[in-house]
Amino acid sequence: MVQGDKERALVLVKAFPQPSQKYDETVCCAGVTPEGKFVRLYPIRFRHLPIDKQFNRWDVLEYFAHRPVGDHRPESRHVNEDSITVVQFANQLNEEQKVRAWLPHVSPSIEALKQENLSTERSLGIVKPDEDSLRFKARKLSKDSAEDATLRSTFRQFSLLDPSVLNPITVEYEFSYQFTCDGRSHNMKIHDWEVQSAFHRFKRDYGDGGMDALREQYQQRIPERNLHFVMGTMKAHPRQFIIIGLLRSGVAPAEVARQRGLF
């Protein structure tokens, strides 16, 4: 693989693992460079990475990457996963520094983001849902649905390709937010890895009360902390934005906006 250019990025998003015929299973990540540019990093076979290369949100990565062939989204970077190095850990950034990193990428609305996508091909952005408009929804995957059955079986199939490395991923629910943004109504699936991980953690800790705990977290607690959505498009659907990550902070972005600087 061509090494490409050495780059750095602060990781904002780790999307849920997706089965891949070519790479077995990949995770698409989004981050911000020290120059303030939004980047999409893929294909990263996160669960195949050695422990010292596995990273968390808000870690700063150094890696080699190049522009991928056939992907016209300007933020996309094809990463050499063997070159990934964590050069700064999440605990070295305070809340204000984190908000400074993503605040310049906030769009007024999803519609404004779509218009910019049409004019500049922009495929990553951040929006703020209208206050008190959020409704967190969980849909249990149906055994009778062909689409749901395919999703379940695909993850089982690819997760078992290398049992010594990957444990099977159990996908039981599809999570989404119904909300308004600048007064317009939207209903979108949440593709962040975090929500699936939280579900499994709450189910383990609270048993039958796991879903109630998850609903309280995503319906009440998270929206209270200046919730913003990281939006992105898929290569196959370059005009369609989906929620790929959730950002929140106890620091008010309006206060941070009065200051300057990123990292």
Image (spheres, rainbow, N blue to C red):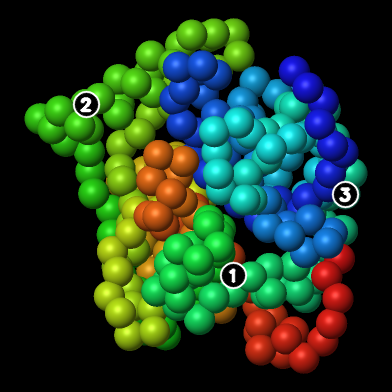
Disc 2 residue crowd, few under 14, some 14–19, many 20+, Cα 10 Å: few
User: Which mark sits nearer the N-terminus, 1 or 2?
Assistant: 2
Residue with the mark numbered 2:
149
N-term-proximal mark, 3 vs 1? 3
Q: From the image, tell me which residue sits under label 1.
A: 248
State if disc 2 and disc 1 touch (CB < 8 Å): no
**258 versus 67 height, above or below:** below
Q: Residues within 10 Å of mark 1 (few under 14, many from 20)?
A: some
Res. 64 image quadrant:
top right
Residue type beneath disc 3: Gln
Return the residue at label 3: 88
- N-terminal-most mark, 2 or 3: 3
Tell me where residue 166 sits by quadrant.
Answer: top right
Q: Answer whether residue 72 is visible to the viewer in this image.
A: yes
Q: Quadrant of residue 236?
A: top left
The residue depicted at 45 percent of the width and 63 percent of the height is 118
**Which secondary structure lies at badge 2?**
helix
SS for tag 3? Answer: strand
Q: Position of residue 218 (x, y in %)?
A: 42, 64
Q: Amino acid at mark 1?
A: Arg
As helix, strand or loop, the secondary structure at mark 1 comes to loop
Front-most of residues 221 and 260: 260
Amino acid type assigned to the residue bearing label 2 in the image: Ala
Task: Find residue 209 and name its label.
Answer: none
Q: Which residue is at a point 38% across and 18% down the rendered structure image?
A: 156
